[in-house]
Image (cartoon, coloured by chain):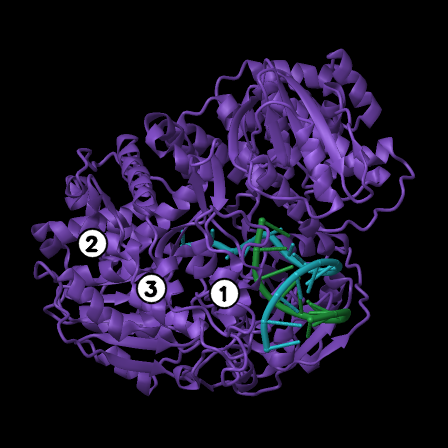
Chain colours: A purple, B cyan, C green
DNA sequence: GGTCAATCACTTTTT
DNA sequence: GTGATTGACC
């Protein structure tokens, strides 16, 4: 890729080593080449040693590559550079803490210390596990925060919040927040008001209401607010009003959040203490303590500062990393290299504004760091900007396509804020430009992609650049298929498998959903409790038919061979040995099996988990689809399938962008967490708890509902994702869709052609490990005990096949809106609010509720800790209404459909409520009501018996057929 | 152009 | 469980 002689801009970057630089390095512009040469030039000076230069990267592989390329072009050899600070941010922070970090926690008011034995917890799964454990204890110790437990759907959200706060440099101390962090939480009212005003400006010269007012036309719908919330008309003004009152900005911004802040601070601080006592640090905390150390300990800071600092992929830095980089700079010789158009890691707390607002942030952060001491040298710094414009990867046509992509609206209503001046135009160096850009479509999208690939291979129309610079026909290995989701990649791979199509997946896999993991889990369950749910899987794998399995389970006596194997496993001492024996039994070898073994062993080592805990760990892995990296062994000449994120930094002659369907790319902005941090407003709580009424209750936060509509809808990252994908291509780009093509394609514009897929089966020699790790044939159905997973559609389908052959076709349901309005009414009525029924449905609710004697109790969708089958499960929002009196519990569920099929399904669903609640209210009788509204009937339905329920669970574990 | 109701399609990405 | 979109009606 890189020419041996630098071009002009590259030379400027290489030679201009003094002062602060911001380098805009677009894709394929020889950034690594220039950065490594620059490094070489600096360290080759007699007065500079490698230890004087920090080169920070984001991945270990990037660090390794940098180091190797430096060795090629400097006076230093690999051995001399082996310990040089060419590292990821994380490993450098680790190094720093090892050297100077012993007392770092004391600066936050923690007595614990960081020692040589403090481990870095890399595995997110394990950290989530630890946090869960911590939070359980925290709850018991801190009853004063009960209100927030109630409003919290999942403790994991708090861990996410802590990570996000840490990434912005907001840390807790023993009695408050570190270095003015609280002002971030409070937010900046002026900044908020600017956004509010922008959203609240009437349009069409004042004839049309503001976007904000329009957005709020469904304010309160499907929501329950506390009584202090304004009504919709109070908020929006009457008919004909064009905008919200200015006072609203203040009203939504000013909220008493002292309790919320105290809660978050306590959890955050106590979790830091917990981690230190358990002798581990997460990635976030590594950076947190490194920052605190550098801020507070002048001697450590001076020892840690470098003469030169270079940061690669600067668009991927978080706010905290930017600040860390400044603290590590002993001079103004600071060089940030990045490309805002390739910032696609915001979910990893990357903040693109580090690049787009570089100068302003540099000034602001330096001022903050220097407010009470002289910490960093950036004083009135005027950074030098360098733009690398020459692209050595792609043809002019591909570059042109990418530049249209970065400015194309990603969805209707998406206003593109890209200033053409911000896009550094690239020029191509390609020897010829025969680029094909096309769109294909067919409803069998997988087949369409595969046959398109076959049409490309060997086809001179898609010639690529050969080693000699001359065109040659493409091979399988020249082609990469990109997707947004791993799921799609896995589906495509399964389709490819049918045709023996040479295709390999590269990236993380959902390890716990693979066959080896499922079987290991089954055997662990058998060892632990002789569980039916383990035997069903094992026997199914052994080839027994469904009814045979049923008989074995009923009698509890099993075939000789598996029974003997089980006895053998019982004699083994370690979980690792069990895993190895199980994988051997089924001949699982290769990457996935290795990774599974390693993961199981490390969970065990890291947590000294018992077998039961390991089982729960794996079950959670299945539920959440946690991924583990597997280096896929691609054949010599195979198509690569990967997510766009995984493809970053790579290049391929031909790129196929798959799954470009309407609504899939981009996905809708959405997702919600109970407690959100949003710049500039700060910490907001989406649900609020109130004890004002006779019964505790959780409400939606009306302020939050207004605020979030003032924040810009960001599709920017979706555009950047497309940009990254397109710029991987050297010569040709194909977009593929299965349904209606995404509007992105119209914008580019790319014509989409309907094609007729015809995949030729190849019948290749099977590589030894070809079946691993993607031969997942079992449905992704539920395995765990949680009512939600039991209620998964696959359960119902599996049961339907046996119990309701010939059931009538699925009727149209009436959707959720209707049901939730009735639901809202029911809640209000049950709470004693002054509401009157306005239609027959609501009148029936009144009848139903009036028919229930005793006190009323509304159970909102909050979490209840329950033990089922000895396992702790979390139940969220399981019923619309739970009515509790001294001796009985009535479960009320509103449904909007009364067909036979629906009734049968509800019966199963209800049985889950029944059995779970039965355990919860151990001494109470459980009654159930099922309320149909669409034809006005109300029925009492008997839940399934325990055995029937068990059979359902088993059915999902044994794939039918 | 505002309002309301109904309908539809969707719930990633991973250092 | 939500946002976008559409159509009827004012």
* Quadrant into which the N terminus of chain A falls: bottom left
Q: Secondary structure at mark 2?
A: helix
Residues marked 1 and 2, same chain:
yes
User: Could you tell whether A63 is left or right of A805 in the image?
Assistant: left
The residue marked by circle 2 belongs to what chain?
A
Discs 2 and 3 lie in a common subunit: yes
N-terminal label among 2 and 3 = 3
Q: Is residue A263 visible?
A: yes
Query: In the figure, residue A937 lies in which quadrant?
Result: top right
Task: From the image, tell me which residue sits under label 2.
Answer: A180
Question: Residues under labels 2 and 3: Cα distance?
Answer: 37 Å
User: How far apart are the two marked residues, 1 and 2, measured between alpha carbons?
Assistant: 35 Å
State the CA–CA distance, disc 1 to disc 3.
Answer: 57 Å
Marked residue nearer the N-terminal end (1 or 2): 2
Q: Which mark is residue A66?
A: 3
Tell which subunit mark 3 falls on. Answer: A
Examine the rendered structure and indicate whether residue A922 appears above or below residue A38.
above
Q: Nearer the viewer, residue A88 or A900?
A: A900
Label 3 packing within 10 angstroms: few (<14), some (14-19), many (20+) = many
Q: Residues within 10 Å of mark 1 (few under 14, many from 20)?
A: many
Question: Which element carries disc 1, helix, strand or loop?
Answer: helix
- Of badges 1 and 2, the one in the foreground is 1
Q: Label 2: how many residues lie within 10 Å, few (<14), some (14-19) or many (20+)?
A: few
A345 horizontally vs A578: left or right: left
Is residue A958 shown to the viewer in this render?
no
* Relative to A190, A113 lies left or right: left
Q: Pick whichever, A86 or A584, lies toward us.
A: A86
Q: Are marks 1 and 2 in contact (CB under 8 Å)?
A: no
Tell me: residue A106, above or below residue A22.
above
Q: Which residue is mark 1?
A: A236
Above or below for A644 versus A578: below
């Amino acid at each position: 890729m890189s020419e041996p002689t630098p071009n002009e801009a590259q030379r400027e970057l290489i030679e201009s080593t003094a002062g602060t630089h911001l380098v805009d390095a677009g894709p394929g512009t020889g950034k690594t080449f220039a950065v490594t040469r620059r490094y070489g030039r600096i360290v080759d000076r007699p007065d500079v040693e490698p230890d004087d230069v920090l080169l920070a990267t984001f991945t270990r592989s990037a660090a390794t590559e940098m180091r190797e390329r430096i060795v090629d072009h400097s006076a230093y050899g690999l051995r001399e550079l082996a310990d040089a600070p060419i590292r990821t941010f994380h490993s450098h922070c680790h190094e720093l803490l090892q050297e100077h970090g012993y007392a770092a926690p004391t600066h936050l008011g923690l007595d614990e210390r960081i020692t040589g034995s403090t481990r870095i917890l890399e595995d997110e799964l394990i950290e989530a596990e630890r946090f869960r454990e911590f939070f359980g204890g925290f709850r018991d110790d801190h009853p004063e925060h009960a209100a927030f437990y109630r409003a919290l759907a999942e403790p994991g959200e708090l861990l996410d919040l802590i990570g996000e706060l840490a990434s912005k440099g907001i840390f807790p101390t023993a009695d408050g927040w570190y270095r003015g962090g609280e002002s971030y939480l409070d937010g900046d009212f002026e900044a908020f008001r600017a956004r509010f005003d922008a959203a609240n400006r009437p349009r069409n010269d004042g004839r049309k209401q503001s976007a904000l007012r329009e957005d709020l036309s469904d304010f309160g719908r499907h929501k329950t607010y506390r009584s202090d919330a304004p009504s919709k008309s109070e908020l929006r003004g009457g008919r004909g009003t064009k905008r919200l009152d200015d006072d609203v900005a203040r009203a939504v911004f000013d909220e008493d959040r002292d309790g919320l802040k105290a809660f978050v601070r306590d959890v955050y601080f106590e979790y830091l203490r917990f981690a230190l006592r358990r002798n581990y640090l997460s990635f976030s905390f590594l950076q947190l303590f490194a920052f605190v150390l550098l801020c507070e300990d002048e001697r450590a800071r001076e020892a840690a500062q470098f003469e030169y600092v270079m940061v690669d992929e600067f668009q991927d830095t978080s706010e905290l990393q930017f600040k860390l980089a400044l603290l590590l700079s002993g001079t103004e010789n600071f060089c940030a290299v990045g490309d805002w158009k390739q910032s696609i890691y915001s979910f990893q707390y990357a903040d693109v504004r580090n690049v787009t607002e570089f100068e302003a942030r540099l000034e602001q952060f330096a001022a903050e760091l220097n407010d009470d001491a002289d910490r960093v040298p950036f004083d009135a710094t005027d950074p030098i900007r360098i733009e690398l414009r020459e692209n050595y990867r792609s043809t002019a046509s591909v570059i042109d396509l990418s530049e249209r992509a970065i400015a194309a609206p990603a969805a209707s209503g998406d206003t593109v804020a890209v200033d053409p001046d911000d896009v550094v135009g690239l020029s191509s160096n390609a020897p010829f430009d025969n680029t094909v850009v096309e769109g294909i479509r067919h409803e069998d999208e997988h087949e369409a992609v595969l046959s398109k690939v076959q049409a490309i291979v060997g086809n001179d129309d898609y010639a690529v650049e050969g080693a000699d610079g001359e065109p040659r026909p493409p091979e399988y290995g020249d082609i990469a298929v990109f997707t947004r989701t791993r799921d799609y990649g896995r589906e495509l791979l399964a389709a490819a498998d049918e045709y023996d199509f040479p295709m390999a997946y590269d990236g993380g896999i959902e390890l716990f959903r693979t066959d080896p993991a499922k079987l290991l889990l089954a055997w662990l369950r058998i060892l632990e409790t002789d569980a039916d749910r383990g035997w069903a899987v094992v026997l199914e794998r052994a080839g027994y038919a469904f009814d045979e399995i049923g008989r074995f389970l009923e009698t509890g006596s099993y075939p000789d061979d598996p029974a003997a194997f089980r006895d053998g496993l019982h004699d083994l001492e370690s979980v690792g040995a069990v895993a190895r024996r199980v994988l051997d039994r089924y001949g699982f070898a290769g990457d996935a099996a290795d990774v599974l073994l390693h993961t199981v062993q490390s969970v065990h080592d890291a947590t000294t988990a018992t077998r039961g805990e390991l089982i729960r760990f794996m079950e959670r892995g299945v539920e959440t689809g946690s991924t583990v990296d597997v280096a896929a062994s691609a054949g010599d000449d195979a198509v690569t399938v990967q997510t766009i994120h995984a493809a970053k930094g790579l290049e391929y002659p031909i790129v196929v962008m798959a799954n470009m369907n309407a609504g899939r790319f981009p996905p809708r902005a959405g997702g919600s967490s109970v407690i959100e941090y949003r710049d500039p407003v700060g910490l907001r709580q989406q649900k609020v708890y109130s004890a004002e009424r006779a019964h505790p209750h959780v409400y939606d936060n009306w302020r939050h509902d207004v605020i979030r509509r003032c924040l810009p809808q960001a599709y920017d990252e979706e555009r950047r994702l497309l940009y990254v994908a397109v710029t991987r291509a050297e010569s040709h780009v194909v977009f593929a869709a299965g349904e209606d093509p995404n509007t992105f394609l119209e914008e580019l514009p790319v014509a989409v052609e309907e094609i007729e897929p015809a995949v030729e089966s190849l019948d290749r020699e099977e590589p030894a490990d070809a079946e691993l790790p993607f031969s997942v044939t079992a449905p992704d159905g539920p395995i765990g005990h949680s009512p939600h997973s039991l209620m998964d559609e696959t359960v119902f389908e599996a049961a339907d096949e046996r119990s309701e052959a010939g059931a009538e076709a699925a009727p149209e349901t009436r959707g959720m809106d209707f049901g939730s309005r009735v639901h809202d009414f029911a809640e209000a009525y049950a709470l004693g609010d002054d509401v009157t029924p306005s239609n027959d449905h609501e009148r029936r609710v009144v009848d139903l509720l009036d028919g229930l004697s005793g006190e009323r109790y509304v159970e909102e969708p909050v979490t209840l800790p329950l033990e089922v089958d000895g396992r702790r499960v979390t139940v969220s929002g399981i019923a619309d209404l739970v009515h509790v009196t001294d001796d009985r519990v009535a479960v009320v569920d509103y449904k909007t459909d009364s067909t036979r099929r629906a009734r049968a399904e509800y019966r199963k669903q209800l049985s889950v409520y029944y059995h779970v609640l039965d355990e919860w209210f151990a001494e109470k009788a459980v009654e159930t009501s099922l309320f149909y509204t669409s034809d006005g009937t109300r029925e009492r339905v008997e839940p399934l018996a325990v055995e029937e329920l068990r059979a359902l669970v088993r059915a999902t574990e044994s794939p039918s057929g």
